[in-house]
Image: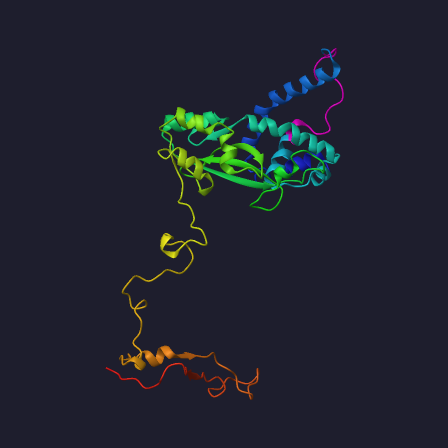
Amino acid sequence: MSSGWARAALSHRICTGIGRRKLGTLIEELAPSWLAQQESRLRTRRGRDRLRAEGAGPGHDLPFADRVIVTLVVLRFQLPHAALAVFYGVHRSTITRAVGEIRPLLAARGFAVPGKPGLRLRTLPDVFAYAAAEGVRLRIDGTEVQVRRPPAGRPGRRAFVSGKKKQNTGKATAISDAAGRLLWLGAFRPGRMHDVTALRTEGIEDLLRQHPDVQAEVDAGYQGLARDFPGQVSAPPKKPRTDAHPTRRPAGNGTGTSSPPSGSASSTPSPNPNNGGRCSATSDAASTFRRPPRPSPGWSPTAPPSADHMRPTLQASTDRPQSCTYS
């Protein structure tokens, strides 16, 4: 399979997520940084400056444009590196090395701001400065992605075991605007670390103090941050404990049951004919129950249903007397 055919197929918008025109612009933007990175690596390996002119020597098995395309495809679909190596006719390690070179360059570009083509947000302080200047209300949430299990004997191996996912994960914090458009993704930590702890290690508390006008919405995992900054961070109320008293549970707690108000028909005891009380006309209906239809012994799956075969039966309860005085 030729490299040109693979480039034509994988550079499609379905594979990379961006159009070919934007892809060409991205390649032109990343090329100087990649060339400087390669020159620095070669100089470190040689220990001196180059003796021949730049560009001399054998070429790369995977050109720079294909390296960018392969990295975008891996980030979009998480395809195995060995499968992409078959497309280009190279070894799997070549794809792995290319992805390792391009990913830091893409991350260094930062995040584009909707409606402001020349503005890029690269750090968390950039996000708060932009929110304070434009009056943007932020939304903060954490996400977990499954990762490979660290090798045995590695220090801190258990730190990747997430208590929520019950598997090895990596945690990242995402910040978006009120419309849900992503502004920043970072604070990468092991999955066992709590959401608010991962964000506090990035210095969000100092940023909230520096920008008192910035408002943020968080989920229940950031209750501590909302408690420390009640005027800036809003979080949903805590979920009630399962063993809490029903009267202490807020309305709409999702349990599906609620205690009836005092004096309602369901909380008022029904009169009992044994103690002289009157019985309403619905007493017999309340003391009976409808059994599901039961087929008779002559029922056949191929025969048409008969009214006698599927006749429901009513059985009166014997716990209450059948004689009632109706008003």
Is residue 258 rendered to the left or right of residue 106?
left
Q: Nearer the viewer, residue 153 or 174?
A: 153
291 above or below 224?
below
Q: Quadrant of residue 132?
A: top left
- In which image quadrant can residue 152 be found? top right
Which residue corresponds to the image point at 57% horizontal and 29% vertical from the top-left? 106
Which residue in the rendered view is the most extreme toward the front?
A: 275
Location of residue 202 in the rendering, given as x and y in whole percent from the top left corner:
51, 28
Please provide the residue range marked out in magenta. 50-67
Quadrant for the N terminus in the image: top right
- Would you say residue 119 is visible in this rendering? no
Q: Is residue 63 magenta?
A: yes
Could you say where residue 118 lies in the image, as x and y percent from the top left? 46, 24
The answer to whether residue 315 of the structure is visible from this angle is yes
How did the renderer colour the structure? rainbow
- Secondary structure mostly seen in magenta is loop
Instruction: Give coordinates of residue 305: x percent, y percent.
Output: 50, 84
